Image (cartoon, helix red, strand yellow):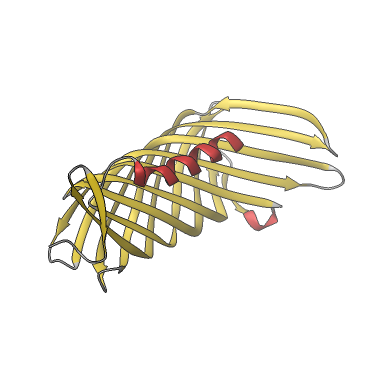
Amino acid sequence: MKKSMVFFVMLFCLSPLAFAQQEVWISAGYEFGDFVDGYIYQGQEIETVTSSHGMNIASYNFLFNRFGIFARGSFLSPKKTWVWDDNGMTTIDLSDYSLTFDSGLIFGMVYRLDFTNDFKSYFGLGINWFTTMALFSGAGTASYSRDTNNIGIGGDIGVKVDISDRFFLQIGSILTLDFARHELIETFTGTSLTHTSSRWHEKYLLFSARPYFAAGLNFFWNIENGRRRFISGKPS
């Protein structure tokens, strides 16, 4: 878990520096939505829906005018999960857990379409990595932790409105489709680890749709004689 988070932070921070961009957008905002997944566990079909919300940060780095790379990270707090199995539906209130936390990263290519100089749409597609962490403290000294890591593909689609050369607003949605999940469950009595369960989910599939609202900053460079020169306004 710690190694994954370090990788996430380094990749997100370094993505704007990967190439010499002419134009960079940096934004932060609020997102919400549902995660719908299904898998096979002990021969039984399981389906779940989890509602979640939180913040996200993003970097869009345009290399050749309309094309570029992007990274969008999410930091979410899941609230409630509905589970369907052979016994019917069960509702899990995640506020009963001591800690629940989700984080994710989409990293890939982005294309933008400029309707005007101040109004643009964008379409991103890339690799999606998503992790969840939950800690539950039961009666007495018993507790357990659950860590999952998903891999799949993710998309980012939205519109951007520049309210000045420097500031902009965004509205869009994250769409993901994950096809693999690894789960690690550790059970504790006091501070002693008493049981560990590690497995890949069978026939796993997850879809999420998460609208977001964000605000951000534009940065522009002119590239002259192989060097980048920062400019204060939009390039002509």
The x, y position of residue 192, in whole percent, is 83, 33
Horizontal arrangement in the rendering, residue 216 relative to residue 202 (left or right)? left
Count of all numbered marks drawn on residues in the image: 0
Q: Is residue 106 left or right of residue 186?
A: left
- 143 with respect to 92 (left or right): right
**Quadrant in the picture for the N terminus:** top right
Locate residue 15, reporting x and y percent: 37, 43
Query: Could you tell me if residue 90 is visible in this image?
Result: no
| Residue drawn at the location 54% of the way across and 51% of the way down | 82
Tell me the residue at 52%/54% (across/down): 76
Q: Nearer the viewer, residue 83 or 217?
A: 217
Question: In this rendering, is residue 51 above or below 143?
Answer: below
Question: Is 157 drawn above or below residue 88 in the view shown?
Answer: below
Q: Residue at x 19, y 66 (%)?
A: 119
Q: Tell which of 153 and 18 is nearer to you.
A: 18
Quadrant of the rendered image containing residue 151: top left
- Residue shown at 22%/51% (left/top)? 22
Which residue is more in the foreground, 113 or 179? 113
Q: Along the horizontal axis of the image, is 207 left or right of 197?
A: left
Q: Please provide percent x and percent y for residue 122.
A: 23, 54
Point out residue 210 in the picture as x, y percentages from the top left corner. Answer: 39, 55
157 vs 63: above or below:
below
Residue 189 lies in quadrant: top right
